[in-house]
């Protein structure tokens, strides 16, 4: 287990999760904390009030499709979501997640996860252990240069480290 | 070795003679485009945190469009911050309240075929219509680009989408795109370069090609390329830009592509995408004649001059149905000026349409014209995700400006050819 291992309950959303339901545009001018209260409410109003730190969001194909708005990742970080697992991610969402150090794991078997299952997610190893179902799901490994960035806490801390080491 | 257009631009930006798809390269960015929503208000604190300024202010274009004009204290503060940041960072290419970024960028001659462009917006694929490898990125990533002038990218494999044949009366690029969203799905192009080609695409005007590249985002594409030709060059020259050595920016005929789909424009019907996804699309002839509350001609996708002309063709001498509101937000101030001069705005106004400021407006629920609970809208924009244009329980249908205007007249979803044929007859 690496230091980035997360543990929590699964919130299962399936396919069709776009950035407008993650981060609704009508709340875009307000604070990120306020917007987080409305995260995913168009598909499940019980999610934002009840999600616990470390819980895992599980999606289907092209999770996070749509806008480039980074708030779609930031609200999940505000809600202290431990990781997002999906069969596939929309390109910009995936990059935004890595840049903001939210582990996003591509898991071809994501559909086997049921709502409320207890999961242990190890981004470094690329595994999701479903303790409720007693099985381990393999995920695509996160490329090493992205893993290094997540370990630094995201792109900004990573760049800062680089800029400072270049200056030194 | 033969390369696709996407590979050629990536190789050039990476300073390499050759790249292959799948390879991760570090690309030098020729241009960075940011707007008021994802731009200064997000990147300013990040650049301060990094302790660096903009790598090259002459290569940054800043456009205010999402919150214009300010409607409350919050949007006014965002715009104020945007203006102050532009001044403090010597951003000469700051187009303040001149229209929507994807339309203003080429309108002011900023795009040249072969450029590698980072755009702080998902519809940055629009730049592909000018032969630019223009990708959408998030704000943190943009802070990295502004600090360094570089970005890492995985060279994408290409999916070629070829259209041949003649589009019929009242059928336009928007219908081609909605038809493809329905047939191929929104995840089809994820992590791929989409390249549009074929005789139908060759015959499209630049503004219509921009619809194709714009909605490459709805096919999931990283970029939505169209190889430059004389149409491209003429458009760029007229905008005061420089097309450069444009002939080189084409895919080699024997370059390897991941997939190649061929479509027939002959017989294509106007298409409508039902709530809540562009891929829920079907010919208008097979779509339920749902009642509408609002018709919206707006956005980078559907409010350029050609789009306003389409709406006017249907609305000339007709009236918007009772109980329906027609909102028109021209994509730029230049579009508004031209449409005023050529009489288009008068036609739209006489029909009962309301002309609004140039900006993103209701498209993403940021500005004026949003929907109440239970309301139904037909829109010339690109996305109809749940809650995007206002209340989470509102409904949005997507269609071409022709079809939107036809629905405004009847108050329900209508085949625009019913009106256009009357005129032709
Ligand atoms: S008009 Fe709509 S799609 Fe275009 S940039 Fe603005 S919000 Fe995005």
Image (spheres, rainbow, N blue to C red):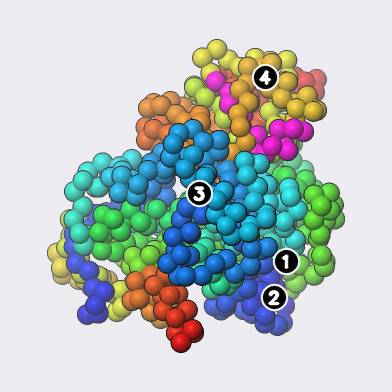
Q: Along the line of sight, which residue is nearer the eye, A115 or A93? A: A93
Q: Are marks 4 and 3 in contact (CB under 8 Å)?
A: no
Q: Are marks 2 and 1 in contact (CB under 8 Å)?
A: yes
Q: Is residue B164 magenta?
A: no
Q: Are marks 3 and 1 in contact (CB under 8 Å)?
A: no
Q: Secondary structure at mark 2?
A: helix
| Residue sitting at x 68%, y 71% | B9
Of pointers 3 and 2, the one earlier in the residue sequence: 2
User: Mark 4 vs mark 3: same chain?
Assistant: yes
Of pointers 2 and 4, the one earlier in the residue sequence: 2
Q: Which chain does the residue under circle 3 lie in?
A: B
Q: Position of residue B315 (x, y in %)?
A: 69, 21
* Quadrant including the N terminus of chain B: bottom right
Q: Position of residue B211 (x, y in %)?
A: 66, 46
Q: What mark, if any, has residue B12 been given in the picture?
A: 2
Q: What mark, if any, has residue B114 been given in the picture?
A: 1
Q: Secondary structure at mark 3?
A: helix
The local crowd at label 3, few if under 14, some if 14 to 19, many if 20 or more residues have their Cα within 10 Å, is some
Give the magenta part as a residue range: B325-338
Q: Secondary structure at mark 4?
A: helix
The answer to whether residue B211 is seen in the rendering is: no
How far apart marks 1 and 4 lie (CA) works out to: 41 Å
The answer to whether residue B147 is seen in the rendering is: yes
Q: Position of residue A56 (x, y in %)?
A: 25, 60
| Residue sitting at x 38%, y 70% | A154
Q: Is residue A137 above or below residue A56?
A: below
Indicate which quadrant contains ligand 1.
top right
Q: Which residue is mark 4?
A: B349
Q: Nearer the viewer, mark 3 or mark 1?
A: 3
How far apart marks 3 and 1 lie (CA) works out to: 33 Å
Q: Which residue is mark 3?
A: B81
């Amino acid at each position: 287990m690496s230091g980035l291992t997360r543990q929590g309950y699964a919130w299962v959303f399936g396919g069709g999760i776009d950035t407008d339901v993650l981060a609704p545009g009508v709340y875009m001018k307000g604070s990120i904390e306020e917007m987080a209260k409305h995260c995913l409410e168009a598909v499940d109003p019980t999610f934002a009030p009840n999600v616990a730190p470390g819980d895992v969001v599980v999606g289907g194909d092209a999770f996070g499709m749509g806008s480039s708005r980074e708030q779609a990742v930031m609200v999940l970080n505000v809600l202290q979501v431990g990781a997002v697992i999906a069969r596939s991610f929309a390109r910009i969402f995936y990059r935004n997640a890595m840049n903001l150090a939210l582990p996003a794991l591509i898991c071809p078997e994501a559909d086997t996860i049921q709502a409320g299952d207890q999961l242990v997610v190890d981004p470094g190893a690329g595994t999701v252990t479903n303790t409720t179902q007693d099985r381990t799901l393999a995920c695509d490994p996160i490329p090493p240069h992205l893993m290094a960035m997540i370990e630094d806490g995201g792109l900004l801390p990573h760049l800062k480290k680089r800029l400072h080491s270049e200056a030194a | 070795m033969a390369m696709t257009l996407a590979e050629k631009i990536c190789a050039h930006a990476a300073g390499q003679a050759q790249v292959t798809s799948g390879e991760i390269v570090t690309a030098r960015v020729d241009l960075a485009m940011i707007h008021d929503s994802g731009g200064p208000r997000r990147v300013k604190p990040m650049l301060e945190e990094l302790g660096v300024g903009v790598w090259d202010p002459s290569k940054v274009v800043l456009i205010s469009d999402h919150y214009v004009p300010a409607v409350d204290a919050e949007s006014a503060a965002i715009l104020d911050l945007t203006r102050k940041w532009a001044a403090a960072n010597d951003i000469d290419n700051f187009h303040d309240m001149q229209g929507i970024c994807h339309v203003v960028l080429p309108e002011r001659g900023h795009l040249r075929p072969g450029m590698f462009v980072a755009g702080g917006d998902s519809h940055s694929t629009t730049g592909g219509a000018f032969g630019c490898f223009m990708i959408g990125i998030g704000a943190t990533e943009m802070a990295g680009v502004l600090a360094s002038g570089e970005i890492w990218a995985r060279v994408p494999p290409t999916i070629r989408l070829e259209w041949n044949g003649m589009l019929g009366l009242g059928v336009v690029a928007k219908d081609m795109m909605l038809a493809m969203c329905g047939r191929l799905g929104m995840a089809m192009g994820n992590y791929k370069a989409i390249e549009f080609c074929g005789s139908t695409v060759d015959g499209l005007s630049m503004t219509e090609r921009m619809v194709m590249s714009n909605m490459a985002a709805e096919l999931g594409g990283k970029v939505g390329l169209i190889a430059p030709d004389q149409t491209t060059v003429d458009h760029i020259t007229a905008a005061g830009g420089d097309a450069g050595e444009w002939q080189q920016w084409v895919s080699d005929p024997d370059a390897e592509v991941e997939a190649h789909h061929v479509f027939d424009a002959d017989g294509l019907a106007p298409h409508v995408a039902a709530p809540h996804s562009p891929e829920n699309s079907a010919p208008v002839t097979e779509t339920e004649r749902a009642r509408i509350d609002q018709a919206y001609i707006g956005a980078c996708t559907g409010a350029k001059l050609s789009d306003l002309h389409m709406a006017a063709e249907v609305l000339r001498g007709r009236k918007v149905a009772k109980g329906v509101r027609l909102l028109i937000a021209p994509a730029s101030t230049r579009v508004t000026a031209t449409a005023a001069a050529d009489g288009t705005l008068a036609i739209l106004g006489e029909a009962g349409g309301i002309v609004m400021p140039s900006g993103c407006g209701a498209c993403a629920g940021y500005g004026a014209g949003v929907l109440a609970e239970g309301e139904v809208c037909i829109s010339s924009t690109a996305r109809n995700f749940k809650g995007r244009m206002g209340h989470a329980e509102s409904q949005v249908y997507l269609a071409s400006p022709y079809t939107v205007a036809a629905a405004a007249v009847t108050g329900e979803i209508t085949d625009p050819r019913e009106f256009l044929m009357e005129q032709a007859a």
